[in-house]
Amino acid sequence: MSTEQKGPEFILDQAIKEIRNEEIPPAVMERAADRVWARLSEQPEVETIRSCADYQALIPAYLGGRLPEARGLLLTDHTHECPACRKTLAAGRQAAPVIQMPVRTGWGFWQGGRKWALAAAIVVAVGLAAYVGMDQFALTPGGNPAVVQNLDGSLYKVAADAGTPVVAGAALAEREVIRTAKGSGAVIRLRDGSLVEMRERTELSLAERREGTTIRLDRGAIIVEAAKQRSRHLYVATEDCTVSVKGTVFSVNRGMKGSRVSVIEGEVQVAQGGNTSVLRAGEQVSTSPSLAAVPVQDEIAWSRNVDSYIAVLGELSTLRKKLEAIPDPGLRYSTRLLDLAPEGTVLYASAPNLGPTLGEAHRLFSEQVQQSEVLRQWWAEKTKPAGTGPQFDEILNRIRAFSEYLGPEIAMAFSGNPAGQYSPLFLAEVSRGGFRAFLEAEIKKLNAGAGIQIMDEPARLAPQQGALLVLLRGNLAAVSMEPAQIQKAAALLERPGSSSFTKSPFYARIAEAYREGIGWLFCADMQAVVKRAGPTEPSQRMGFEDVRYLIAQRKEVGGKTENRAVVTFAEARHGVASWLAAPAPMRTLDFVTPEASFVTALVVKSPTLLVEDLASMVGASQLSEFEAASGVNLRADLARPLGGEFAFATDGPLLPQLSWKLVVEVYDPVRLQWTIEKMAENMNRAAQKSGTAGVRVDKEQAGGQTFYALRGMGLAGDAHYTFVGGYLVAAPSRELVLRAIQTRETGASLARSAKFMALLPHDGQANFSGLIYHDLGSVVGPAAKMIEGALNPEQRKALAAAVPTSGPTLVLAYGERDRIQLASTGSFFGLSPEKLLLPGGASPWSGMSVKKKKR
């Protein structure tokens, strides 16, 4: 068959393949870049796009082919992320003929920058456009992406002019729209083995990319049994959300009110607008408040496999209840191990023995699997051999076996030697006999006889070089690689508490923590560490030369997992360490919305004190030079008009313009505005001498409010601000400033939201001195998915570990006379020590949202 006879699609594929494989000389690339720069430079300056209304105003010109290319690229990319604008664009296409649909490119670039900044943005845009273009046109494997596996009733291919009946076994092409008729159902089998069950009156199409396959669900309901995707993903996209999975069973129902996603087994990620949520078996989410939740069993009742789905849901629900009933290790209020810490201990840590808890969870899981044929088949499918390394059961059994011989905790003490080196000593109680025989058997299994040495009398046995030394004495065990540590431990085992460490203030502080009850504990004698390193002038100026101890804890309090870290000082805080004020109401948070992805806020003792401390650190002469150049006195003109509250947030879309927000408490707005204008005046004077552009301060009255704008800030962009209620509110656009004011007036702020209140730790403080809040998973997760397909397996693994998936995190700070305390609930910046126990955090019950009850 000739090339012409194979049709236009084959010719296009071949052309694309040849273009992709062609090597382009650098000179040609440079000339092309110059042409692009010249073309974009000729385009007139236009107003900045700030909101969806601005995008929607561009749609008529876009559909009419009159919109400049750069603006068209921005609009096209925005509609891919914004359901509202995508809907408006679709309505516009129905009302007017479409001239041309531009190919989707990468992110938009900043408007109004300098030539070099725009050139850099072009490089980024071209690179992203090339990547997305490759994604759009990359050749997929031969054949069609799906076939009709089963058909009950009628299925049609939907075209503009008519519908064509489809029979069982028929192949489905990419972007081909299919629809089930009334009273009909169908099962579609994708290329990767995934099954898509369609309900009656359901319409969908398929699209394949390098990162995976997307099911575009226009209406109706489907149940997806996703095959394991390895490096790829399977997506289900509706008009108002996107579901991403690696291998699970879930349903998506797209109706007039919105979309509802239900999970039958496994875990899915649902992106809706700027928010991302993770759902596990039995959980459900809707995209509209008017779309109420329904039992998952009712949502999938139409499926031909409803019985097996409900059976798995029931078994997992039963197993979850059993796991929730397992008591956690409980708090520890005393210990023998602290008395065995050697002299000179500067670091001490204690962790609960989680072996019994893990063992009981595994026992219940194995028991349920054996009792249930449904669960046994499900588990067999999930644990197909994937490598030659140790399997999950083997690793867990080894941990459990060791832990059964040990007491309720494992401690670690670091002490220094005269050479300035620190070495760890691990300590544990032995709770049952036969530990030595068990240990010798394990050493033999691991063929590690040369690397592990069990010692009864350290003074009589010469240790092997580089061996791990294990001292067993009575019902106590000590492990170290330093013979000196083992000898000290042997002496303390004979006379517990004889070390001078037990009489130190550091020992007393750790003992106090035990009396209050501990779960996970980390303690550092910062005074000893600083003393060994030697005092430095910067540390003295900053007020950290008299820091004493760092005590960090993680424990269950009132049904919540709390993390606390306390840094204590020998006397009242001074220098930089004293900047943080005592806990107080933080009204700056009234201007931040619940949709903020990152917020940091604090209360300082005195802005004037900050300036004086900075002057002592940088030198009075440098401060005087700055004041002479700027024409303002930092103490009188800048610090004195300010109050003590500050807040910064990223609160809104990140593209095409970063939606930042700055809120500052102001006592004297007239003086502060004079200072801003005076500094701008002197900057312009200096810019005029150097022949560069200066800045401009604009002022405008609107709605009885005075608004200011700092323009000509270069890459920083314009800054709009106003004074309201004793605060300066600044943002990159007036619309964002108005939104901040409206948030304060309505009271619908982040600090009053349910998700923020749920993160507050349980303590006696009515206020706090500072905070860091982030919900980065909703921002980083979707961005990471965009680049995941271009990474190798190791890079994808690292990316997955770096992307936050545990929801919002809040860390509070409290400033007291001689200490600073940090507190958070749940995970501390997305980390928890339990995840470090098993390789990769693997667990057969990791997707079951298990919460252990206290004893």
Image (spheres, rainbow, N blue to C red):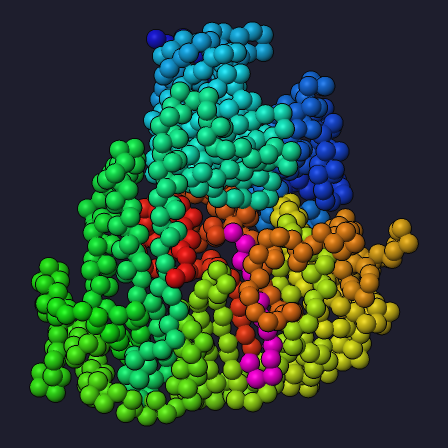
Q: Position of residue 637 (x, y in %)?
A: 80, 76
Residue 641, compared with residue 438, is above or below; it is below
Q: Is residue 718 left or right of residue 77?
A: right
Residue appearing at x 82%, y 61% in the figure: 724
Residue appearing at x 37%, y 26% in the figure: 307
Residue 33, compared with residue 10, is above or below; it is below
Residue 461 in view in this figure:
yes
Quadrant location of residue 591? Answer: bottom right
Q: Quadrant of the C terminus?
A: bottom left
Q: Position of residue 717 (x, y in %)?
A: 70, 54
Quadrant location of residue 209? Answer: top left
Q: Nearer the viewer, residue 128 or 458?
A: 458
Could you tell me how many numbered marks the image carries? 0
Is 753 magenta? The answer is: no
Q: Position of residue 67 (x, y in %)?
A: 71, 31
Magenta stretch, main secondary structure, is strand
Q: Is residue 537 left or right of residue 793?
A: right
> What stretch of residues is rendered in magenta?
807-819
Q: Nearer the viewer, residue 534 or 263?
A: 263
Is 810 magenta? The answer is: yes
Q: Nearer the viewer, residue 766 or 218?
A: 766
Q: Position of residue 415 (x, y in %)?
A: 31, 83
Residue 79 in view in this figure:
no
Q: Is residue 686 left or right of residue 94?
A: right
